Image (cartoon, rainbow, N blue to C red):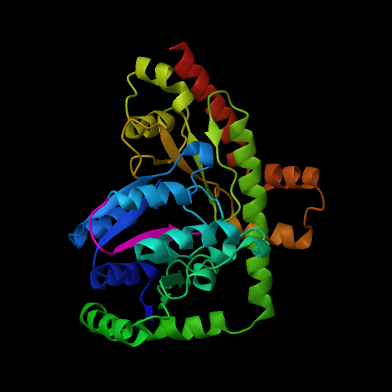
Amino acid sequence: MIGPGTKDLLNTLINIIKGGVIIPSPSWIGYRPQIILTDKHFHTLHLKPEHNYRIQPADLDEFVSKIEGEQHMLILNNPHNPTGIVYSRQELEKITEVCRKHNILVLADEIYALDTYDMNNFTSMGLVYPEGSFITNGLSKDRSAGGYRLGSCILPTTNTEKLQKDFKKVAATVYTNVSTPTQYAAIKAYEPNDEIDEYINITRQIHRIMGHYLSDEWNKVDGIKATRPDGAFYFFADFNELAPDLKKNGVKTSNQLGESLLSCPHHLGTVTGDACMLEPNDYGARIAFVDYDGKKTFDNYKQNPPKSSSDEIEFVKQNATMMVKSVDALRGWVDFIKQT
């Protein structure tokens, strides 16, 4: 099935599938609002930083055993927004065992699949749980085509005809079709094409270089713990070691943390942990490492790709000066918080 963007498809799925929705937290900011708009029940599965915010099968098993209802749908975002983690095949197989045990459907949001830095490490949930997974993807992320709204959804191998029929009924009522110009663009974008393949490969390597540099540098700052991304263009930062100093400064929630980071002279823009479904007093934030000129950086990589780790660091310093400066800004903010 296709629709005018993955968001429309997610909304359609939430409408046609019976039962509650399980949202692992931290999560992409858009899941909760969509579910609230459909007036459905949702359950928040809080992921643990000590497990690098990965779903633990035992925790999922215990969690589902305690909630009511015969059927639930688990949202599984892989690669994961906001942490950048990528699940291994073995991890997905263990999660699938729990899903089969409890009759859990999976909404596998794989919008960042081709943004996995090493594609050998990516496994689609559709390969390990085909009978119970809805696999969603879209044109916007890996092809850098944000305005071209075309999403896709592969339906489970069980009850496919009925699901397709129900899906079509909702789709016909809500959006009818994807705009014709976007369909023609998508045909071209999805055809086998060496130029597009090269583009996707270079952009994923740029994401890797930028993400590893910035997360490594943030982890060197006292009081900050950051995930190291394996896909997409985000990582998640944990500020909870600074909780006593933050509270002394009147920063009592993650939203207030975001305001403090953004304030002059620090100017660090984040998405707050509260928006990512953390508890309000859990000091966390999503960091996007895309503050550079995309075309210029792409061209520079293509002309002279880094050949070593030292080359990669120099590549960041030459092409992403604002991100390099952000590390000093973060250190200055931490010093400010501790000294005030």
Q: Residue most toward the right?
A: 307
Magenta stretch contains residue 175: no
Q: Position of residue 59 (x, y in %)?
A: 42, 46
Q: How many discs mark residues in the rendered view?
A: 0
Say above or below: 208 vs 124.
above
Locate residue 120: give its quadrant: bottom right
Give 321 or 282, whichever is nearer the viewer. Answer: 282
State the quadrant of the N terminus. bottom left
Q: Quadrant of the C terminus?
A: top left
Residue 163 placed where, x, y %? 31, 81
Question: Residue at (26%, 51%) from the top-left corner?
Answer: 67
User: Bounds of the magenta span?
Assistant: 67-78
Q: Is 141 on the left-hand or right-hand side of 28?
A: right
Relative depth, front residue between 293 and 29: 29
Outermost left residue:
39
Q: Position of residue 308 (x, y in %)?
A: 81, 49
For residue 338, say whether it is visible: yes
Q: Could you tell me residue 184's position as x and y percent? A: 46, 86
Q: Is residue 76 magenta?
A: yes
Does any portion of residue 88 appear in the rendered image? no
Residue at 40% across / 31% down in the picture? 283
In which image quadrant can residue 170 be found?
bottom left
Q: In the rendered view, would you say 12 is above or below 314?
A: below
